Image (cartoon, rainbow, N blue to C red):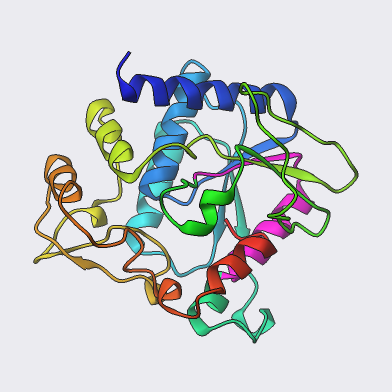
Amino acid sequence: MDDLDQLEAQSVYILREAYRKLKPLAMLWSLGKDSNVMLWLARKAFLGRVPFPVMHVDTGKKFPEMYRFRDEYVKKWDLELLLGDCPPVEEIDPTLPPAARSAARKTAGLATMIEKYKLEGVIAGIRRDEQATRAKERVFSPRGSSHKWDVRNQPPEFWDQYATPHEEGVHIRVHPLLSWREIDIWRYIEREGIPLVDLYFSRNGKRYRSLGDQDITSPIESEAATVAEVIAELQTTRTSERAGRAMDHESEDAFERLRVAGYL
């Protein structure tokens, strides 16, 4: 087995453990590269069919290309799609910086969906290398009845044994991509031929390295127009993956405040 085979096998095991232990279970689908890889892995784990719904917490501010991609692949992959809206920004904590406050709409929208469908498990496509706060996560990460993440009180995970507490109101965030790096994601996309929103590839010298809402996400300077060219670019770049995310340039603690409150 090479390194991609090992990462794939680990993720497939995590997905199967989540399906075995947590019901009802759903997978977050943000339409970005990581969640598309995660969805591809779920199809592999369950022999071509995803046996739980995928959820899109919709801010109404995604790029048109993302909505077209969603509608196309819901049909192609025979997915059960759960759609949820987000509250207006006026209802969000006004002490957050502007971009973080806009992003926090997803936190509230996700909490509403978890309660509506009484979910015991939510699969999310975060990676430890993407952002320092996410490096503190566990593979099976419990969230309290208020959906908050207690970063200082997380269960140990030895020998791939994952705790699944069943207290009233608690749900588990499952992270099958936690050990992957950005370049692993792209190498796997290349190997497997995984479809993506084409905004990831260069147009007129710019591309999106990370996709979010139109008003808080910006492209980077890049000539990478193919998967192979993106991989080559990542091998030399010193620019952060989230350089185009506006909230990452606001106050130092803004992202951790979002994560503690239940952000993805």
Q: Quadrant of the C terminus?
A: bottom right
**Is residue 164 shown left or right of residue 68?**
right
Where is residue 21? Give x, y as percent.
73, 25
Identify which residue is drawn at 48% across, 31% down.
78
**Is residue 181 shown left or right of residue 259?**
left
Q: Nearer the viewer, residue 258 or 26?
A: 258
Identify which residue is drawn at 67% across, 24% down.
161
User: Toward which corner of the image does residue 54 lie, by quadrant?
Assistant: top right
* Rendered position, 40 above or below 255: above
Q: Write down the region rendered in magenta.
A: 104-125
Identify which residue is drawn at 18% across, 43% down.
231
**Is residue 120 shown left or right of residue 169?**
left
Where is residue 129? Give x, y as percent.
41, 49
Where is residue 101? Give x, y as percent.
57, 78
User: Toward which corner of the image does residue 209 lie, by quadrant?
Assistant: bottom left
Q: Nearer the viewer, residue 199 or 235?
A: 235
Q: Quadrant of the N terminus?
A: top left
Q: Nearer the viewer, residue 194 or 223?
A: 223
* Rendered position, 200 above or below 185: below
